[in-house]
Each structure stands twice: as structure tokens, then as C-alpha cells.
Amino acid sequence: MRVTITPEIVAEHGLKPDEYAHILRVLNREPNITELGIFSAMWNEHCSYKSSRVWLRTMPTTGPQVVCGPGENAGVVDIGDGQVAIFKMESHNHPSFIEPYQGAATGVGGIMRDVFTMGARPVANLNALRFGAPENPKTRHLISGVVAGIGGYGNCIGVPTVGGEVNFDPGYNGNILVNAMCIGVADADKVFYSTASGVGNPVVYVGSKTGRDGIHGASMASAEFDENSEEKRPTVQVGDPFTEKLLLEACLELMAGDAVIAIQDMGAAGLTCSAVEMASKGGLGLLLDLDRVPCREAGMTAYEMMLSESQERMLMVLRPDRAEAARAIFERWELDFAIVGETTDTGRFIIRHRGETVADLPVDVLADQAPVYQRPWTPTPPLPLLAAADVPSNEDPGAALVRLLGGPHLSSRRWIWEQYDHMVMGDTVQRPGGDAAVVRLHGSRKGIAATTDVTPRYCAASPREGGKQAIAEAFRNLCAVGAKPLATTDCLNFGSPERPEIMGQLVGCIEGLSEACRALDMPIVSGNVSLYNETSGVAIPPTPAIGAIGLLNDIDHMATIAFKREGDVILLVGETAGHLGQSLYAREIAGRMDGAPPPVDLAAERRNGDFVRGQIVAGNVMAAHDVSDGGLLVALSEMALAGGLGCILTLPKNAGLPHAWLFGEDQARYVLCVSPDKAPGLVSLADAQGIPVTELGKTGGRDIILDGRLIQTLETLRHAHENWFPDYMEG
Amino acid sequence: MKSCVIVFPGSNCDRDVAVALEASSGTPPRMIWHGESELPACDLIVLPGGFSHGDYLRSGAMAARAPIMRAVAAKAKAGTPVLGLCNGFQILTEAGLLPGALMRNAGLKFICRDVFLRVDNSDTLFTRGYRQGQVVRIPISHHDGNYFADSVTLQHLEDTGRVALRYCTDDGLIRSEANPNGSLNNIAGILNEAGNVLGMMPHPERLISPELGGSDGRAMFDALAELVQCA
């Protein structure tokens, strides 16, 4: 295929004129069309992080618990007893908007491959989803497709989907966010990396055949949408979870031996990205013979093969003397296995097809010389505090509570998680609906807790405080089940980095995340960046989605949110100032969108979280819940609904304005439920450590009672809380 | 107890049921690959849950034609107890070892949740650990669990006590609101004519200890272990 490279063709490949000039300079000649495609795949935003790289480098990524930080397929963290947890969260936003079922399904498939590529058996999936306004005509269809796609993939492969979160905001009308997280567990001495080594070692292709699907998917994911985005449907890949299940079992079987030198899954930009990354990390060259690549369709060109994003494929470098034993494993699992090339010492990426050399490119240029941009940025202007007195409080608290718990933001997500198999593998000890999900480490009494968090409305109002809050909330959710927070993965979803105000959001959020990760000892070990989430010039709210994991040494000392029995003492840990700016109450009840978000005091987060976890592990806590969206009254109601047991509360004398006290979203707070005999000891211990604790009342009855007045019956609350989602979806 | 768990490509509850069998009997089961054509001597055969062959074509349809299924059918005919859970139940109906079919859930969605089951026949190898009429809480997790059989078959199942388990309310009432998937007569599990083959959509292996949220499933595996140890 001889194609003359015109400026139009360069532009169609998402390369800017100066980027193309750089290619001409380093090659000292014109690239052919296959080579241009390879550059486009390696240098797009999705693969090269060219706009975010300088800022990502500033994030904390190390710690004694970190075995491997960003740069590999997923992050690796020590969990003791010779085991590691391997985890990552990744976006599949653009494809999910265009084709929700397949977009979300292949997002789940891709993140699981990232984890088992490194030798870990996936043990839990989570997902963080953002949709447009409920009244947007597309929203229902998108939710339905995304949820079915996530379930369709995860259920089939047999990994439990145990948690996640869902937000609605008109800012996502044109760009939904689908962020999928997977956690796996491996033996510490059986972790596999993507660094090729040795010359003349076989490069092996396994898994599904290569088809024409998903060509230029990564480039699509690096462009804004417009009214013609529907036309990009053919760039969305199609998932086959059954093949992935076979691939998982075959890979883990192979990895039990010593055949694998390096392995890389074929995700974005497929064969191109996986081959270049393995060669580049090993400082090697690589020769590929495309005539040996298993193809689904006849007559595929080199260009198509190199850019295909067909799913469920892996590329490996094997020890030559183990290649035939490896072939036997994959053939038994009825998967393709083909030696498609070898490692070389030339430093060149050479591709042969039908007897011709169709590409000859320097590996280091492809991998390391992608442009890096210092994009101009302007900080997000700070917003003034919103005084609680300026937020109208004319609505009865019980009515406001029903509206909040029975609305899109806080209603039960049961409609979603009942479509996910959250129990397969037989180790789910805390199911969806609590602060964090917990899966038992198979065959032990230890557990891994996991959560996803971010509050985009806070990030929009103050990227820095919002970034801090995302980490702080993840920290709280882990502490509230009794887990020691270990590490973090992030999915940085933003609009176009070419706009200084969007870059300002990215920079602010990264600064906030970094500060909180340092203060709370939760380094970032993996993640991805998804930019250009905008349609016709309208960007999404800044959404640095966080996934975090923690460790429980004994699942018998785990807390859940449910009230357990009548007469337990309800305590609030942490300070209540009654902060209503950017609260759900202000937005949904009082119609106020202005004001700064709640400030995050990281020292208080650390102190209060460590205290709460210590009390749970000591066996002093009957139930625990962090206070976040919706404030204190919502947290208490969620505990009551989960336990089917009400509570009798007293407004403290120094509470200030009741609506601010009940619905304010001050940070660093937890509600604990403690047996009466243990309460005094816990309170005095907290006093001694300078941790504010307020007694709120007792559990009992079937209602929420405040100062002797009925706020709401549990029956009314449950009806509102459980029915919003199914009613909405039925339209 | 010597038990065998058949593993098909796409089975994903094979490990879970092996854990349950070992917990009750003290002995891990033999895991038998679907491509085998013979079974070792055993006292119990389990077809586990999952998505054999990706549920492509129809749930269980391809697995029912696996080489090992001829051996399973022969053992079943000879009286060896066979338990099919979820996808295992679908395979048993596709293989003709149990009557009827499991169609797409009436709500057309995958459902994973705890449900209540009434034990309507406790005089079986599998359900002896429960009282007749006992209500137990066991999870379901399926897309195709909507049991259907023609009216003659259904009547025959009912008349001969072959409906072992039925979806019910928490107080044991057989109501449509307690039926998660549209199954005829709220059927959750049925027996073959001889009573040695049970297929059920719920997953007893998922609730075998309190930390998993309940242990109502345990009695089924305890009963099977006890039975074959006495044999």
C-alpha cells in the first residue's frame, strides 16, 4: 500500500504539524502510512500522557508497602505473608458513550488483563460511573447499557464486582465516565513485568485472533466529541469474556512455571504498544513477522494489524526452551499461540509483512520521545465561603431527608449491583452498599478492603480541596471497615488540556491528591489519564476518580454500617462546623450551587481515621460509617436502613443552625455505634488524644427521632431510598 | 467422600463448590476436565456454576455435549448422586438428565441476591439436612433461571414430589413477588425420577459460613458428606 502522506492524513492521525516535523527530523525521511499509524498510536494522549506527564511526575508513588509503582500494567503492593495485591483503575469513557454495552464490557476486560498480565488472579472488580442528568434523554439508555456490559463481562469471567459509585450531573451529558478497577492477588515471588531481555528470544502472541475492530481506538479516546461522534462506533471493540476466562487460566498456568521473561497485554494500540513497550523497557529491538499473526479476517494490511484493538490478546517474550511447553498449555485452552517475532539487539522496531519490511523505526524514539507538553494553565479562582445562615432552611428536615435519600444522588444503587455477581469466588465478606467492600484473602482470615471515591462538585469548586477530599474520603471508607489504607490508583478524567482553565483543574487536583496521599500514606501506584472529555466545547466537571485498597489482618474485626441492636450508643467522631457550601443539601434542597467546598484537614483525617480503625480492630465498635455526601442525618439514616433499626437523637447544645448541623458536609467525621458499657472508655480515650467525640443518642425503634420529634419513619425512608433507581430506569 | 467436580471451559464456581465439599467432608474433590471421557469411582458428581462455553448458543447447550457428559449420564443412571448448581442445572436440562428448560429471567436482567427457598422435599440425598417446609436463605446469581416445563411434565413433577426447592417469602409463602425470575410454580430446584439427580439455580456453596453472610447452604454439603461416608 503506497499512500502519500499529506498534511490532511497527518491531521487525521491526531498528530499536530510540529509533532510530524519532529518525526521527519528523527527519521530523516518520510514515514510510510504504517509507520505514521504506529507513531500516532504511540504518541496520542491516551498512550503517551504528553499533557499530564510533567504533573504526574510530582505525585507520591513510593513507600515501604510499594513493590512496584506506576509504569507497569498495574501497581503492586505488599500485603504480607509473601503475597502482593496488584491493582489499577482505568477509564473507558469515550467508547462507553458511543456503544455503552461493549465500551463498558471491554473496559472491564482490559483492566482485568492489566492485573493478570502481572501474574495475579483477579479477586475483585469495582467501577466508578458518572452519567448526565437523569432527565437527559440519553442517560437511561447509557446506564442500562453500561451496567449490563460491566455485568456481562465480570459475571462471565467469574470475578466478583463488589463496589463502586455512581454520580449524575448535567456536566456529563455529552461525556459519561466509565472507570473500572480490578484488584488481584499474587505470590510476591511470582510477579511478572513487561521488560524484555535477551536477544533472539521468541515473541509470542496468544489469545484471540486479530480483526479490524477498534482500529484507532486510542486516538479516538484522545479527541473531543462533536455531533458526529456516533460515527465513531466502528472504533469501539467487542468483548468476549469467555475467551478472556480461558486466557486468564492459561496465563496463570503458564506463569506457574519459568517460561515467561516478559508479558504485556494488548490494550490500547494493541500490537504496536505492547511490542514497543517490552522492547523499550529492555533496551532491545524487536522483529515482528505479521504473516504469523493469527487473523480473524483475510487480507488485513500491516497498518490494520498494528492498530487493531481486538480484545483478549497478550504478547509475551518466552524462554526459547519453554516455548513448546507453553504452546501445549494454550492449545489445551483452545487459544491461538503463535511465535510472531524475536527480540534483537538493534534497537529497531522492524515489521515484516508479505516478504517486505513495512516499518523500521527506532524503539526509543517511539517510546521515549513522544512530545511532552508544558501546557499553559490558569488556576481555578477560589470561591468565597457560603455561610450556613445564607442557605435557606425552610424545608422540614424530614422532608429534606426523604428528598435526598430518595433522589438520584443518594438513592440505593441496588438496581445496579444486583446485576453484578458480587459473591462468586466465595470470599466476599462485605458486599456492596457499605463504606468499602471486603474480600477475604482466599484460605486466610485476612481481607482486602476496596473503595472508589471522588466528589466532582467539590473538585469543580476547588480542584485542590476536591483532590484532597477524594483521597480523604477513600481513606475514611477504608478505616470505617477496619482496614489499614495501603495505596491508591487514580483515573484522572478531565476536559481538553489545550484549554488553560482545564489544565488548571488538572494541576489543582493533582496537587490536592498528592498532598493527601502523602499525609495519609496512600501512595499512587497506578492509574490513567483521560483527557478531552468534552463535547462541542463543554467539558465534564473535573473528576479525579480514586480507587484505594486497605488491609484487614482479621476479618472477624471488621465493621459494617448497619445498626446491630437496640440501646447501643451512637457517637460522632470529628468536628462539625456545619459547612453547607457545595453540599447536596445546598444544591438539591436550597438550590444554592455557590460557595467553597468543605475544607479538608489532613491531620484531623489521619488522627480520626487511625482512632476509628484502632477501636474497630480492638473490638469496641458495633457499627461504623463515614460521614460524606448528604451529611450526618443521611449517614445515620443509612446505618438505620442497613440494620432495619431506628435511632433516638439529641441535638447538641452547641449545634448551631440545625440544618447546617444535620446536613453539613464537614470532613474527617465518622458515626460509631458502641455498646453502652464500652462507650465511656472510648470517649475518654478520644478525649485524651484530643479527638472530638459527641454523643448523638441511642439505637432503637423503627424511626429517626430527633429531640423527641419524629424526623421520618424508616418505612418512608426505605421506600424512597430503594425505589428511586428502579422507578427511574423503568421510566 | 470421593467426589468429582466437572470443569468446563468457562466454569467459574468450580473452586467455590470444591471449598464447600472439602469443608464438609474433609476431602477435596477430584476436578475433572470436560474433555475426559471417563470418571473415576466416586460417590458424588457436581456440575458447578459459571458460563460454560460463555453461555454462547444457549446456557449449558454446548457443555451438555462434552465427552465427559456421557460418563456423567451413565453414572447418574447407575444411581450416583449428581448435583447441578446454576449453570450445572442448565447443563443437566440440556443433557436430558432433568426435564424442562431454563429460560432468560422474566425481568431480562442478571440477578445476584439472596433469596428465600422452601424445602418442599427434604427426603432426598441432597436436602436431608433440612426440615420439610424449612425456609432457607441462599443466593441466586443468574441470567437464565426461569424454569419452564410443559404442563404434563410440570404436573408430573409436582405429583411425584420432585420439586425439591421453591422460591418463597421469608415466612415460607409461595408468592409471585418472591419469584425472582419467573419460574413456573416458583421452582428453584428439581429432582430426576430416581431422586439421585438434583438441579437447582441457587448457590448453596456461597453461604456456608457466617462471615460470608450466612450458613444455610452448609447443610446440603454436610448431608452429602455424611451420606457417602456411611455408604
Image (cartoon, coloured by chain):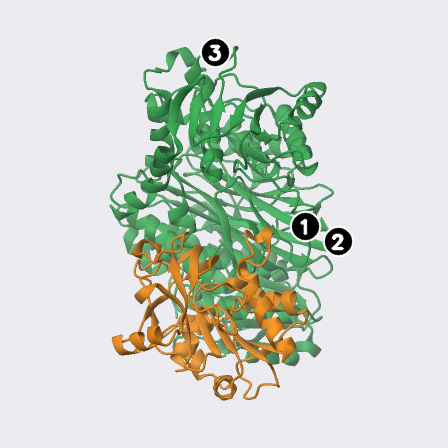
Chain colours: A green, B orange
Q: Are discs 2 and 3 both within one chain?
A: yes
- The answer to whether the residues at label 2 and label 1 have Cβ atoms under 8 Å apart is yes
Marked residue nearer the N-terminal end (2 or 3):
2
Would you name the residue on which mark 2 appears? A81
Provide residue B99's location: percent of width, then percent of height: 36, 78
Q: Is residue B91 left or right of residue A317?
A: left
The residue sitting at 61% across, 61% down in the picture is: A278
Which chain is disc 2 placed on? A
Cα gap from disc 3 to disc 1, whole angstroms: 43 Å
Helix, strand or loop for disc 3: loop
Name the residue tied to disc 1. A446
> The N terminus of chain A is located in which quarter?
bottom left
* Residue nearer the viewer, B97 or A553: B97
Q: Earlier in the sequence, mark 2 or mark 1?
A: 2
Q: Are marks 3 and 1 on the same chain?
A: yes
Q: Nearer the viewer, residue A148 or A361?
A: A148
Which quarter of the rendered picture does the C terminus of chain A lie within?
top left
Question: Considering the numbered disc 1 on the image, is that residue within a helix, a strand or a loop?
Answer: loop
Residue appearing at x 47%, y 35% in the figure: A645
Q: Are marks 2 and 1 on the same chain?
A: yes
Chain letter for the residue marked with disc 3 in the picture: A
Q: Position of residue B201 (x, y in %)?
A: 43, 66
The kind of residue tagged 3 is Gly
Disc 2 residue type (three-letter): Asp
Q: Residue at x 59, y 52 (%)?
A: B210
